[in-house]
Amino acid sequence: MKLLLDENLSPKLVAVAKYAQDHGLIICSKDSDLHQLSFLLGFPPKIVWVRLGNCSTTDVEKLLRERFAIIEAFAVDDYASFLSLS
């Protein structure tokens, strides 16, 4: 499982989605635009939406580590395209 982490990307996200698709990556983001993009374009790529609001990098890391088993199951699910974590 490989995650592509973004940092507040602009609405021009199609290039990021294409890169993730071409390289077999799951996009992990706090950006709601990726949520919308996943409904518009479908998958691949898969999207993990981190919904923590204003928080530290440590908080995001902690959430990803705590939910690792969920993310891992999501990664191998052939039908799942979007995962929301909070």
Image (spheres, rainbow, N blue to C red):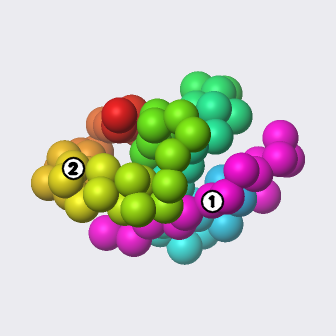
As drawn, the label of residue 16 is: none
Q: Which residues are magenta?
A: 1-15
14 left or right of 34 in image: right
* Disc 1 crowd, CA 10 A, few/some/many (<14, 14-19, 20+): few
The answer to which of marks 1 and 2 sits earlier in the sequence is 1
Q: Which residue is mark 1?
A: 6
Residue 8 visible in image: yes
Dot 2: element: loop
Name above or below for residue 55 compared with residue 38: below
| Residue 74, magenta (yes or no) | no
| Disc 2 residue type (three-letter) | Arg
Residue at the image position 39 percent from the left and 71 percent from the top? 2
Which label was assigned to residue 67?
2
Q: Can you say which quadrant of the picture contains the N terminus?
A: bottom left
Residue 42: percent from left, percent from top? 56, 35
Q: Residues within 10 Å of mark 2 (few under 14, many from 20)?
A: few
Q: Viewed as shown, does residue 2 lie left or right of 6?
A: left
Quadrant hosting residue 61:
bottom left
Q: Is residue 32 left or right of residue 69?
A: right
* Tag 1 secondary structure: loop
Check whether the beta carbons of the residues at disc 1 and disc 2 lie within 8 A of each other: no
Kind of residue indicated by mark 1: Asp
Quadrant containing the C terminus is top left
Give the Cα separation between the discs numbered 1 and 2. Answer: 18 Å
Residue 9 among those drawn in magenta: yes
